[in-house]
Image (cartoon, rainbow, N blue to C red):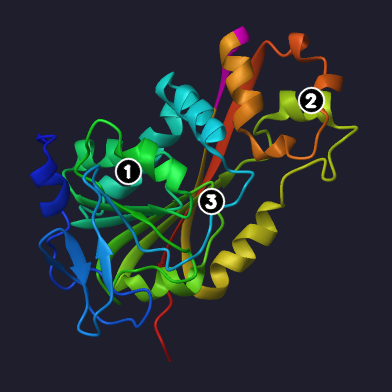
Amino acid sequence: MRYDNTMKDGYLKFDMRGVFRCPLCASPLALAGQSLTCANGHCFDVSAKGYVNLAAGRGQSAKYDKALFESRGALLRAGFYAHVLDAAAEVLAAEAPVRILDAGCGEGYYARALAERLGAELYAFDLSRDAILLAARGGTPVRLMVADMTNIPLQTGTMDAVLDAFSPAHYGEYARVLKPDGLLLKIVPAPEHLHELRQIAKEQLSHAAYESGADVEARFAAGFRLLETREVSRTLPLDAGTRAHLVRMTPLLFGVDISALPLASLTEITIAARLLIGRARAES
């Protein structure tokens, strides 16, 4: 997919009638000049960088700062999650979706790659403006939004698929924005994910393991029919640079005294993911 990185393109990619929804009054939004506006007079300026802030006053978490997303981006560009991306692309390609939403997109790694590989319309949001600024860097065809997971600024039944990769979920909103037979792909850590790091930090971790697969599946199945699960895993070498990025980017170490960890012994890391694939339950 060719994308011309011009200011005009940054605005015009938001000229999508019948897709965006006002986060304040739930009315349709349409592009007027360089802003998305609704019939009730609410106006949201589209940045020349190629994103729009539709968070309606919600602020980002202090823990998820620019440094975290920059380090995560560095690991992603180095290929540490390439096998996860490949698995997600395979699932979504089988659907031939026209419109995909990347919910909690962070620095936009998955959305950008899927737009390129699948030729679909990609919509992506995160509550962190820092993350969205990184996602917009260099230009992208992805329609990027600063937005709240509990109030997704898209109209009902407009998405063919929703991707949630290592992000908290709001299944009610996912079901609302999906078309009646739309697909949800949720990616969560598999049991062995980052096990080398968890091993050296275990004395300080409040939870020795990730949430059980059964618990994750139960919440998923409350709103969606779980069709299939898949797991992918790779163990990759770490050098001093990638180790520093890993430590800086992972929420696993929030609240951990990193100076007390024997990080020099961390020479490899396992990236393991579980893919939950499902469709919204039909209303009775």
Q: Which amino acid does label 1 sit on?
A: Ala
Q: Position of residue 61 (x, y in %)?
A: 60, 51
208 lies above or below 198:
below
Instruction: Tell me which label, 2 or 3, sits earlier in the chain.
Output: 3
Q: Does residue 278 appear to the left or right of 221 in the view shown?
A: left
Label 3: which secondary element: loop
Q: Does residue 248 appear to the left or right of 55 in the view shown?
A: right
Instruction: Tell me which label, 3 or 1, sits earlier in the chain.
Output: 1
Residue pictured at 47% horizontal, 55% vertical = 127
62 lies above or below 150:
above
Image-quadrant location for residue 64: top right
User: Residues at badges 2 and 1 in contact (C-beta under 8 Å)?
Assistant: no
- Regarding residue 40, the answer to whether it shows in the image is yes
Task: Please name the residue that numbered disc 3 is placed on.
Answer: 167
Q: Which numbered circle lies on residue 201?
A: none
Magenta range is 234-240
Query: Does 236 lie within the magenta span?
Result: yes
Task: Please name the residue that numbered disc 2 is placed on.
Answer: 258
Q: Distance between the residues labelled 2 and 1?
A: 31 Å
Q: Which amino acid does label 2 sit on?
A: Ile
Q: Identify which residue, 158 or 85, lies in the foreground.
A: 158
Q: Quadrant of the N terminus?
A: top left
Query: Does 275 lie within the magenta span?
Result: no
Label 2: which secondary element: helix
User: Residues at badges 3 and 1 in contact (C-beta under 8 Å)?
Assistant: no
Q: What residue type is labelled 3?
A: Ser
Q: Which residue lies furthest to the bottom in this view?
A: 284
Q: How far apart are marks 3 and 1 (CA)?
A: 14 Å
Q: Residue furthest right?
A: 203
